[in-house]
Image (tube, rainbow, N blue to C red):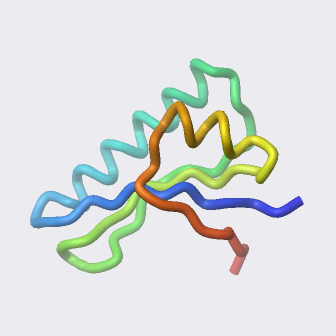
Amino acid sequence: MRKLKLIWDFKGPEGIKIAEHHAIHLKEFLQIENYENLLTGFEALNEFHAIAYLVVPEDQMKPLRDALKPHRGQVYSEE
């Protein structure tokens, strides 16, 4: 099954710290809602742009998207 990467963008000098903090909240949400085996984290794209992300199977995307309101999404490929 195809996986999708839900993405939250954070820009500016504090973007990396905010993305890291947002990833903590994503993990907490997954625990509270009893989601298992979903990949989440954060990534610095450069010093002024970072992302927090959640990788989900396509069939679970809509309820998570509606609850968490990501800024964007893309097809996830394991590289």
Query: How many dots with numbers?
Result: 0
Left or right of residue 9, residue 47 in this image: left
Please tell me which residue is depicted at 53% across the width and 31% down the height of the picture. 67
Please tell me which residue is depicted at 40% across the width and 55% down the height of the picture. 8
> Which quadrant holds the N terminus?
bottom right
Counting from the top left corner in percent of width and height, residue 30 is at 59, 30
* Quarter of the figure with residue 32: top right
Please tell me which residue is depicted at 34% across the width and 77% down the height of the picture. 45
Counting from the top left corner in percent of width and height, residue 57 is at 77, 51
* Quarter of the figure with residue 6: bottom right
Counting from the top left corner in percent of width and height, residue 59 is at 81, 46
In this view, 68 is above or below 28: below
From this viewpoint, which residue is outermost toward the right? 1
Please tell me which residue is depicted at 41% across the width and 66% down the height of the picture. 43
Question: Camera-side residue: 58 or 44?
Answer: 58
Counting from the top left corner in percent of width and height, residue 22 is at 35, 43
From this viewpoint, which residue is outermost toward the left? 13
Left or right of residue 53, residue 1 in this image: right
Left or right of residue 36, residue 21 in this image: left
> Which quadrant holds the C terminus?
bottom right
Left or right of residue 46, residue 66 in this image: right
